[in-house]
Every structure is written in structure tokens, then in C-alpha cells.
Image (cartoon, rainbow, N blue to C red):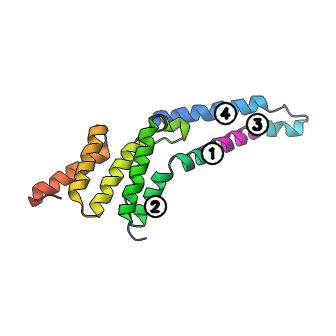
Amino acid sequence: MSNKIPIVRQINWFAVAAQTVVVIMLILLVFLLTPPPETSVDASARLWRPLLIALCIYLGWSFISKLLAFREHRKGMLLIRQEKYREAIEAFKRSYDQFADYLWIDRLRWLVCLDASAVSYREMALVNIAFCHVYLDQGEQAKQVYERALHEFPGSMIARSAMRMIESFEKRTGSNL
């Protein structure tokens, strides 16, 4: 598809550090639970096997948890890439509702889903909904959703930047988006 949609990724460095600690603890746990080598030939396996097993557990947990928890979000992103913005809005609304119902998953996404994003999935859902409204030439709805995002997430750099662009456009053209 020729349409390149910009993607903004903000990393929560606390989450990265916490995940690193989790991986190290997992490696140590596997190391302690694996029996010692029977021969000196197996000694090198004693070192790399726990690392390999721990990383497989970590990656498996990450993949499965994201597959289950972020299904609607991923569906919305796919629909955006396919330029099906109305359907994407509905997917992001379902994603928002899911994370609103289970706030703890969104708050602890660094642990539950091993996601180091600094932006919550509720905030992502709102800015993606507004983004879709822009592409559907529904400027007033986009503005309302960006304002809602700023109300719920006052530190949202994405929503704040979008609102500045909208206000700049409106000031320059003398018309609403």
C-alpha cells in the first residue's frame, strides 16, 4: 500500500528496566531448577540452556498475551492500513471499552503483556479514532475526540500536537477543520 501512516512510539524506560529484571529473574529461576550437568561435556549447556528457556518463556508470554489483550487494537491498525476508517473507528472503540473495563491490564501492560509503551492503549484508541475521523473529513468529530483524549490524558503529546495543528489550520484559513 502506498499510503504510509506515521506511527509514534513512546517508550516507558521504567517498563524496559522492569522487564529486564523479570528476564534476569526468570533466567536465575530456570538455572536453579535445572539439574547440574552429569559430565563436564554438559557444563556449557548448564549456562546457555537457562538463558534459552527463559527467553522462550518470555517471548511466548509476550506473544500470547498481546495476541489476546490487543486483538481489537491490532484489528483497528490493520483496518487503517487498508483505509477502512469507519471500521477502524469501531475496532478502536471496542479496544477503548475493553481497556476501560480492565484498567489494570492497561496500567500494568509492561508486566501483563510485556509492552514497554509509554502511551496507554485507551489513549492510543482515542487518538486513532480521531485520526480516522480526519481521514473521513469529519473534522469536528476529530476535534471532539482529541479534546476528550486531552481531558482523559492531559499529558498526551499526540493529542496536543494534533490540536495545535487543527487550531493553526483554523486560524490560518478562518474556517473549521
State which mark lies toward you, 4 or 2.
2
Q: From mark 1 to mark 4, how far is it between C-alphas?
A: 12 Å
What number is the disc on residue 26? Answer: 4
Q: Position of residue 147 (x, y in %)?
A: 24, 45
- Please indicate, yes or no, whether residue 10 appears anywhere in the rendered image: no
**Residue at point 84% right, 36% down?**
43
Q: From mark 4 to mark 3, how far is it between C-alphas?
A: 14 Å
**Residue at point 27% right, 41% down?**
150
Q: Position of residue 80 (x, y in %)?
A: 40, 62
For label 1, the residue is 59
**Residue at point 40% right, 71% down?**
2
Q: Secondary structure at mark 3?
A: helix
Dot 1 or dot 4: first in sequence order is: 4
Dot 1 or dot 3: first in sequence order is: 3
Three-letter amino acid code at the position of disc 1: Leu
For label 3, the residue is 47
Dot 4 or dot 3: first in sequence order is: 4
Three-letter amino acid code at the position of disc 4: Leu
Q: Are marks 1 and 4 in contact (CB under 8 Å)?
A: no
- Please indicate, yes or no, whether residue 57 appears anywhere in the rendered image: yes
Three-letter amino acid code at the position of disc 3: Leu
Dot 3 or dot 2: first in sequence order is: 3
For label 2, the residue is 78
State which mark lies toward you, 4 or 3.
4
Q: Are marks 2 and 1 in contact (CB under 8 Å)?
A: no
Is residue 56 on the magenta stretch? yes
| Horizontal side of residue 133 vs 54, given as left or right | left
Q: From mark 1 to mark 3, how far is it between C-alphas?
A: 19 Å
